[in-house]
Image: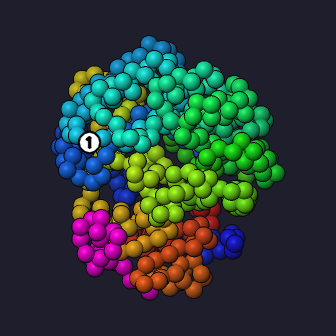
Amino acid sequence: MKITPQFLDKYNKTGPRYTSYPPATSFSTKFTSSEFVPAVIKSNDEYPESISIYIHIPFCPQLCFFCGCNTSAFDSTVKVRRYIDCVLKEIDTVAQHIDKSRKVSQIHWGGGTPNSINYDFIEEIIDKIKSHFSFSEKCEVAIECSPAYLELEHIDRLAKIGFNRLSIGIQDFHLDVLNAINRKPSKHPIEQVIQRIRENNFDGVNLDLVYGLPLQTLESFKENIEKAIALSPDRIVTFSYAHVPWVNSLQMKMDENKMAGPEEKLNMLLLAYDMLTKNGYEAIGMDHFAKPTDDLAIAKHNKNLHRNFQGYCTRETTGQVYAFGTSSISQLWGTYAQNIKNLHQYMDAIEATGLATDRGYSLTKEETVIREVINEVMCNGYLDFDVIARRLKITAEEVKTITNYNPSKLQPFIEDGLVEIVDDKIHVSADGMFVVRNIAMLFDPNLGITESKFSRVV
Ligand SMILES: C[S@@+](CC[C@H](N)C(=O)[O-])C[C@H]1O[C@@H](n2cnc3c(N)ncnc32)[C@H](O)[C@@H]1O
Ligand code: SF4
């Protein structure tokens, strides 16, 4: 592998991370609930036919200093009850506009800490979804859990409610690091937690780790990866610590002098990549790793990997996303719509009207083509213009014109062995995936590019 700070410096330019196209920063507050309802109705005739549902639970019993998610302290069950009633009402309001012959293929619970609320609330919401929709045979039902609040019996209950994938937020196994980020360790030994998940026949378990936290060193991070490998989950995610104090001012409480700089963070990423790929995990993008038997690894092999705001997913399970709860983003074929972030304003809006759209974006036909190409490059490291053209029912020439494609733009990447063009199909190498954002940018005609530091990658 030739990934060094100098190598990344050569290629890395500032630009979008392409978690969505166009990015969430282009969403407009002129897009309100009056635009969202017709967009939902239109989505019934758009692609994909299947339905993904996202439920956001913005509560945590204790707030971690490093957190970049939209959450707040869990101060009373009365407030949680009111919030759950709002989510139930929002589901009723949106569901009446969705064609009931469409099936739910994916449900994802994120937050916040969804496993910290009363499990009867969780069951109520799943029952509400079941009352409106039927599920596809392989429907994925996943929940993000903090192990600090996870009793072993909770795992049995989640299985009974219908969950088949659990994501466990480890972040770091070391107590001093957890103390420095104001986080409690797992309530039960993590081996027992994983064992109980296996006994309940879940289809998969993910572990989340973060690098770049206070007190972490290359050596301590290596221990985290070793322990994660020994636990043998289906997926391991190594997130780079994202410094976003405008989302969470608590991040300012962490001592920056005790945090790894960009070069050390890069070494942590490379170490994780090396250890995990040598121990039977396949790299999905740069920071997700999956066992070869896992659906994501299979999708990557079949060049069929996809992405939404909840992370990587397969095209079989991912539908258009209808999102519920504060700050959640619906991702329909032609529209993005984000709910109000503030908890009280969200609840007031839902109680008054059943909807709480705060901002959104309607894509042009050209943007849907550019998005498809960028997703394909970012997820699969592969681009076949004919495949995209067939999917979008246009010609390959139209795809090339809309994305301003010119093979000469790829020349520097080809000379460095990061990209190959064979029979008009573009292949990104394993090293090339470290700068895949920069390759994707070449297919984005709406972009101004400037130079920056290699730290962009981590
Ligand atoms: C909603 S949390 C997961 C569930 C639960 N709240 C927990 O903490 O275990 C989603 C994940 O986002 C990641 N995350 C949160 N803040 C982050 C940050 N500032 N930088 C990078 N990753 C972050 C963590 O790995 C976390 O597990
Ligand atoms: S990392 Fe998880 S538990 Fe910690 S504050 Fe964020 S959402 Fe809550």
Looking at the image, can residue 260 be seen?
yes
Q: Position of residue 13 (x, y in %)?
A: 53, 69
Range of the magenta residues?
A: 386-408
Up the image or down, 230 lies above or below 26; here it is above
Q: Amino acid at mark 1?
A: Arg
Residue found farthest to the right: 219
Percent from the top left, x then y, of residue 337? Answer: 31, 44
Q: Is residue 259 visible?
A: no
Residue at image position (37%, 38%) is 53
Q: Which SS class for mark 1?
A: loop
Rendering coords of residue 228 (x, y %)? 71, 45
Disc 1 crowd rating (10 Å Cα; few below 14, some 14-19, many 20+) is some
Q: Quadrant of the C terminus?
A: bottom right
Give yes or no for residue 216 being in the magenta stretch.
Answer: no
Q: Nearer the viewer, residue 385 or 261?
A: 385
Locate residue 3 relative to residue 295 in the image: left or right. Answer: right
Q: Nearer the viewer, residue 207 or 211?
A: 207
Mark 1, residue position? 102
Q: Quadrant of residue 348?
A: top left
Residue 453 to residue 70: above or below:
below
